[in-house]
Image (cartoon, helix red, strand yellow):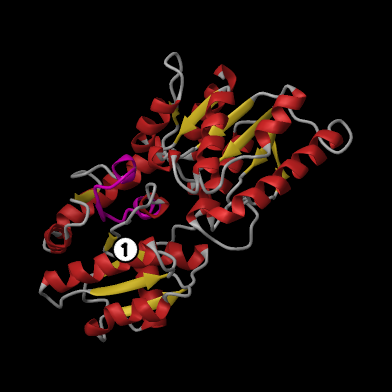
Amino acid sequence: MRIAFYAPLKAPDHPVPSGDRTVGRLIFACLRRGGHDPFIVSRLRSRAAQASDQREIRRRAEAEAERLIAGWGRDWQADLWLTYHLYYKAPDWVGMRVCRALGLPYVVVEPSIAPKRADGPFAPGHRASLQALHRAAAVICMTRHDMACVAAALPEDRAPLWLPPFIDADAWPQPEAGRARSDIGERFGTDPSRPWLLAVGMLRHGDKLASYRALAAALHRLGRDDWQLLIAGDGPARPGVEALFSPFAGRVFFAGQADRDLLSSLYAASDLFVWPAVNEAYGMVFLEAQLHALPVVGAQTRGVPDVVRHGETGLLAEAGNDAAFAAAIAALLDDVSRRCRMGAAGRRFVLEDRGMDKAATRLGAMLNDG
């Protein structure tokens, strides 16, 4: 099928990296892997930073929809429209209007519904998101956490489908661990005789900064100094993150914004991945770490249990419990053989159940059934 792909929050080819862009690109690639022909039909961003922005954004979206409707058959054609990731701040004002006018099947992947937004300043965006779900031929969620609210918003005779989060293993270099550890040690001055913890996340204000704050609090509770922490990421909150970890001088190293080659080396070289994932949908970084046979410590929040098998590929602490997070880190720091078993199990889990081919088969069946 030729598939018109639209991401209201951020197009897959947007220049600014983010988790949302990463997953959007994966969905796009997954469609191609399944033999479809996806194309970006619009790059209009519908995110309203302030509630007062909604009216103007909707006006521009409706104009974009009319442009697309007028160009049908001349500038573009498709068998199906797929909207990736809509929510009350970034609803799909475009796709519904185009599909209604042209009679195109409309599919929504990874919607987020927040019932508490039914009233208040963002109510228009919330209503538009609900309308999209009711208009859609298929609604596909990527976390079981989101499915409850989405299911409640759908008619009784319809249910959301679940597409488990996945990764493109072939896109990662996955260097040999020993060589990667040597290279990273030389580059950043880390001590290869001590365990290396790794955290990967943009240094942004909001939930990312909250995640780093929770990680720093857990390391304070750890009460030991036989570890080093590598942080991959950069952004406007870097001074704040550096201040959080300043008490651990000489044990925390900032790798900056890392491309895929460097990230792959960091994953392969490290001993334990640690990330509290505050308010994240699930955290693609957990799948990336496990692909590289790196055991993980995370939190039992939102969709993280969908990407980490607690007790098998890593440990998940109670969300917001710094002491529990520290205890999970300590348990794996003290047990090398357990870390090795979890790392091997994590890699099997990703390759066997969360690879691109498996995802393409799952998504293709959902599109055909929808």
Q: Secondary structure at mark 1?
A: helix
**Residue drawn at point x = 44 percent, y = 25 percent:** 160
**Residue at the farthest top position:** 157
Q: Residue at x 36, y 78 (%)?
A: 240
Residue 78 falls in image quadrant: top right
Left or right relative to 45: residue 110: left
Q: Which residue is mark 1?
A: 211
Q: Quadrant of the N terminus?
A: top right
- On the image, the x and y values in percent for residue 276 come to 28, 58
Picture mark count = 1
Identify the image quadrant of residue 157.
Answer: top left
**Quarter of the figure with the C terminus:** top right
Let me know if residue 305 is in the magenta part.
yes
In this rendering, the answer to whether 323 lies above or below 89 is below
> What type is the residue that disc 1 sits on?
Ser
Q: Residue furthest bottom?
A: 249
Q: Position of residue 109 (x, y in %)?
A: 53, 35
The answer to whether residue 352 is seen in the rendering is no
The magenta-colored residue range is 288-306
Residue 187 to residue 268: above or below: below
Q: Residue at x 35, y 76 (%)?
A: 241
Residue 96: x %, y % from top left: 66, 31
**Residue 319 is one of the magenta-drawn residues:** no
